[in-house]
Image: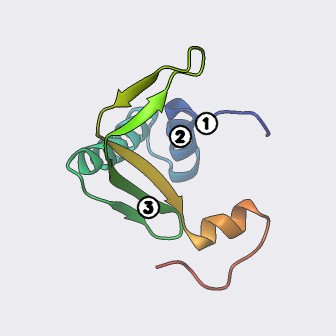
Amino acid sequence: MAGHTVTRADLCEAVYQKIGLSRTESSKLVEAVLDEICDAVARGENVKLSSFGSFVVRDKGERIGRNPKTGVEVPIEPRRVMVFKPSNVMKARINGQTSESEDA
């Protein structure tokens, strides 16, 4: 459905429906997976999920930005950002294509 946002509760319900764990167990499983992904990314590690994609942490250097209202230049501090890079399998699925080979 276009425009729908999948929430943690939706993920827990999907695990409950498809796997058959109790709702409590399903919730704990989803939370454990999300916590592990968050912890790994916070440590600066990349998280790669085959056929899904990768969560990658990148360092962005200091740069000069501009306030769009006033045009005043301001320094933007260096920071770490997380980006998601979908696998080729995911890209194909999003575009309604089937993929014979999986992205390793």
The answer to whether mark 2 and mark 3 are in CB contact below 8 A is: no
**In the rendered structure, which disc, 1 or 2, sits on the residue that comes first in sequence?**
1
Q: Residues within 10 Å of mark 2 (few under 14, many from 20)?
A: some
Q: Nearer the viewer, residue 101 or 60?
A: 60
Please name the residue that numbered disc 1 is placed on: 6
Q: Position of residue 71 (x, y in %)?
A: 55, 21
Q: Residue at x 39, y 32 (%)?
A: 24
What's the amino acid at mark 3?
A: Ser
Please name the residue that numbered disc 3 is placed on: 54
The answer to whether mark 1 and mark 2 are in CB contact below 8 A is: yes
Q: Position of residue 73 (x, y in %)?
A: 45, 25
Q: Nearer the viewer, residue 64 or 6?
A: 64
Q: Residue at x 53, y 63 (%)?
A: 52
Q: Nearer the viewer, residue 87 or 56?
A: 56
Q: Position of residue 100 (x, y in %)?
A: 67, 85
What's the amino acid at mark 1?
A: Val
